[in-house]
Image (tube, helix red, strand yellow):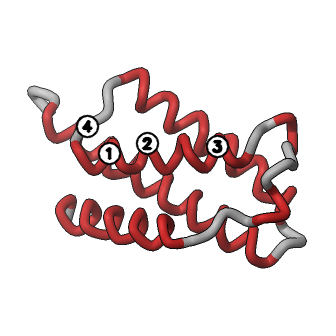
Amino acid sequence: MLEREIELLGQLLEEFGALRFPPDWYDREPGGESLVTLATTLAGCTAATLDGPLDARHREHLRRRRALLADLLPAVAADTYATGYFVTLYRMAVLAEEVDDRRATAVRPGC
């Protein structure tokens, strides 16, 4: 099951990489957050997850950034393309967390 989730995560990352950042959102910072930086960070965390388990610091960074994106999604709701872009990013980040959690559980002794 984990192998399938890793494969799906790789596919999502590839599809996401082909998407163009929503042009109307480059200079907007809902809640004081740069969406460009947030998207770049979450895509990077996803790519790192494909390479193996994240360390505790990166795992927490992924979790916090994914939660931040969830809070910011309503701010883009009126823009159909931006909504699709950021929802795809959110789903990818959720799956990256799940993959990383499964890997961490699988390598812990006694689990």
Residue at the spot of label 1 = 49
Q: Do the residues labelled 4 and 2 touch (CB within 8 Å)?
A: no
- Label 2 to label 3, Cα distance in Å? 11 Å
Amino acid type, label 2: Cys
Disc 4 versus disc 2: nearer the observer: 2
Pointer 3: what residue? 38
Residue sitting at x 32%, y 25% = 55
- In front: label 4 or label 3: 3
Say the numbered circle drawn on residue 53. 4
Please give the name of the residue rendered at 39% of the width and 68% of the height, measured from the top-left corner: 14
**Up-down relation of residue 91 to residue 62 (above or below):** below
Query: Label 2, on which residue?
Result: 45
Q: Residue furthest top?
A: 57
Q: Which mark is residue 62?
A: none
Q: Quadrant of the N terminus?
A: bottom left
Image side of residue 17 versus residue 87, left or right: left
- Asked if marks 2 and 1 touch (Cβ < 8 Å), the reply is yes
Q: Earlier in the sequence, mark 1 or mark 3?
A: 3
> Image check: 81 left or right of 42?
right
Q: Which amino acid does label 3 sit on?
A: Leu
Q: Distance of mark 2 from mark 1, alpha carbons?
A: 6 Å
Indicate whether 65 appears above or below 58.
below
Q: In this view, does 4 lie above or below 94?
A: below
- The answer to whether marks 4 and 3 mark residues whose Cβ atoms lie closer than 8 Å is no
**Amino acid type assigned to the residue bearing label 1 in the image:** Thr
Mark positioned earlier in the residue sequence (2 or 3):
3
Task: Locate residue 105, reporting x and y percent.
Answer: 23, 38
- Measure how far apart labels 1 and 3 are at the Cα level: 16 Å
